[in-house]
Image: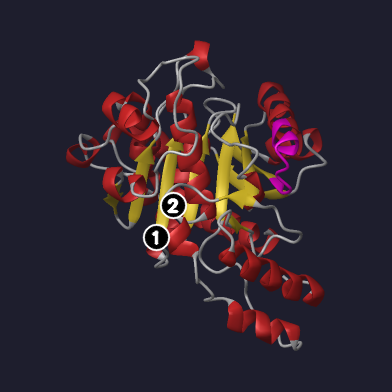
């Protein structure tokens, strides 16, 4: 990724002035034109004086930026799709592959039908330690200053969330898993304490944590907020060969575009023939295709045995490795 040299100089002038002001902002240094974003509570001191990328920008200003890889290990990917298409399988296997490559990985289950733990392969004793954040009444009240489910009451809009991934996440095979849980349907998109906490948490892990992030999302993209989607490197929609899944993919793409997510891509799943592949690719001809996962009985076997498909089948590992390679090329 090549940045405009004038922008880099302007960026550091603005950042210096911000460090001297009380109203400090964080500007993404790798996302083209700046998108100012108020810092989350408790982060100001951590960011103040953080000039670790300054030497890279000096290289860039003098024209030595041709070989610099700006992406590093901290890609941020959201995965969505119609229920039952296999998005959780993709998210779990992708997280395990990244962890096996030595990357720091945070996986977030933001789907109300929470199954990412089993797709990662968490054993029962680890699963028992995992609780959905949306149901933690005392935590919500402590951080927001208002009780869970309080509509129309006063509460903090920027609750402290930076310690939640490490305090409440459960790690297995190098993947740290966090379970968001869901807000009751009547409060979907509500302006309530639990929604504010969850959206601030998602914004925090997107903006300020330096690790690979995989978010397993519901089709509605409910937990993504407009202030943080500029940090999503890619929205991956999983599609099976059928018209309902194709129509859902189009709806998700529209939601992603409304949220200003620039890169929306698809992965085919349950593909059993060349005809299945054509149904997906011709039905979504304006979507970049990252690859396909075959119809695979071993995924059902993994589910019955409570294991990750990653642990029992070479084929799905190879297919997802290919998908990841294409994803990294496109972002």
x and y percentages locating residue 285 in the rendered image: 82, 40
The residue labelled by disc 2 is: 95
The residue labelled by disc 1 is: 99
**Residue 296 visible at all:** no
Query: Circle 2: is it few (<14), some (14-19), or many (20+) Cα within 10 Å?
Result: many
Q: Quadrant of residue 59?
A: bottom right
In the current view of this chain or complex, which residue is farthest to the top? 186
The disc at residue 253 is none
Q: Is residue 216 left or right of residue 18?
A: left
x and y percentages locating residue 53 in the rendered image: 57, 76
Q: Residue at x 62, y 63 (%)?
A: 18
Q: Residue at x 54, y 22 (%)?
A: 191
Q: Report if residue 287 lies within the magenta region.
A: no
**Label 2 residue SS:** helix
x and y percentages locating residue 188 in the rendered image: 54, 18
x and y percentages locating residue 194 in the rendered image: 42, 26
Q: Which residues are magenta?
A: 255-264
Instruction: Classify the position of the N terminus by image quarter.
Output: bottom right
**Residue 27 visible at all:** yes
Residue contact between numbered discs 2 and 1, judged by CB atoms under 8 Å: yes
Q: Report if residue 261 lies within the magenta region.
A: yes
Instruction: Classify the position of the C terminus by image quarter.
Output: bottom right
Q: Is residue 134 left or right of residue 296?
A: left
Q: Is residue 204 left or right of residue 118?
A: right
Query: Circle 1: is it few (<14), some (14-19), or many (20+) Cα within 10 Å?
Result: some
């Amino acid at each position: 990724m090549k940045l405009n040299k004038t922008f880099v100089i302007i960026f550091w002038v603005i950042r210096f002035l911000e460090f001297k002001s009380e109203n400090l902002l964080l500007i993404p240094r790798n996302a083209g034109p700046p998108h100012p974003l108020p810092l989350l509570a408790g982060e100001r001191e951590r960011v103040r004086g953080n000039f670790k990328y300054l030497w890279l920008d000096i290289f860039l200003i003098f024209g030595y930026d041709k070989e610099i890889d700006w992406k590093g290990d901290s890609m941020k990917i959201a995965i969505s799709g119609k229920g039952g298409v296999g998005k959780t399988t993709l998210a779990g296997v992708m997280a395990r592959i990244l962890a096996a490559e030595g990357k720091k990985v945070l996986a977030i289950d933001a789907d109300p039908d929470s199954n990412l733990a089993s797709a990662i392969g968490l054993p029962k004793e680890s699963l028992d330690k995992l609780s959905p954040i949306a149901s933690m009444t005392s935590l919500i009240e402590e951080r927001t200053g208002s009780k869970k489910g309080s509509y129309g009451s006063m509460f903090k809009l920027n609750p402290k969330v930076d310690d939640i991934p490490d305090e409440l996440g459960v790690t297995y095979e190098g993947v740290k898993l966090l379970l968001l849980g869901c807000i009751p349907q009547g409060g979907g998109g509500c302006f309530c304490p639990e929604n504010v906490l969850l959206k601030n948490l998602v914004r925090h892990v997107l903006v300020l944590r330096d690790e690979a992030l995989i978010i397993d999302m519901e089709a509605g993209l409910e937990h993504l907020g407009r202030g943080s989607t500029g940090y999503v490197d890619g929205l991956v929609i999983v599609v099976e060969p059928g018209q309902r899944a194709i129509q859902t993919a189009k709806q998700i793409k529209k939601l992603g575009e409304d949220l200003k997510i620039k890169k929306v891509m698809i992965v085919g799943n349950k593909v059993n023939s060349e005809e299945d592949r054509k149904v997906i690719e011709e039905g979504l001809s304006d979507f970049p295709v990252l690859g396909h996962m075959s119809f695979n009985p071993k995924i059902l076997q993994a589910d019955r045995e409570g294991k990750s498909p990653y642990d029992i089948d070479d084929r799905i590992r190879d297919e997802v490795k290919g998908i990841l390679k294409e994803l990294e090329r496109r972002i």
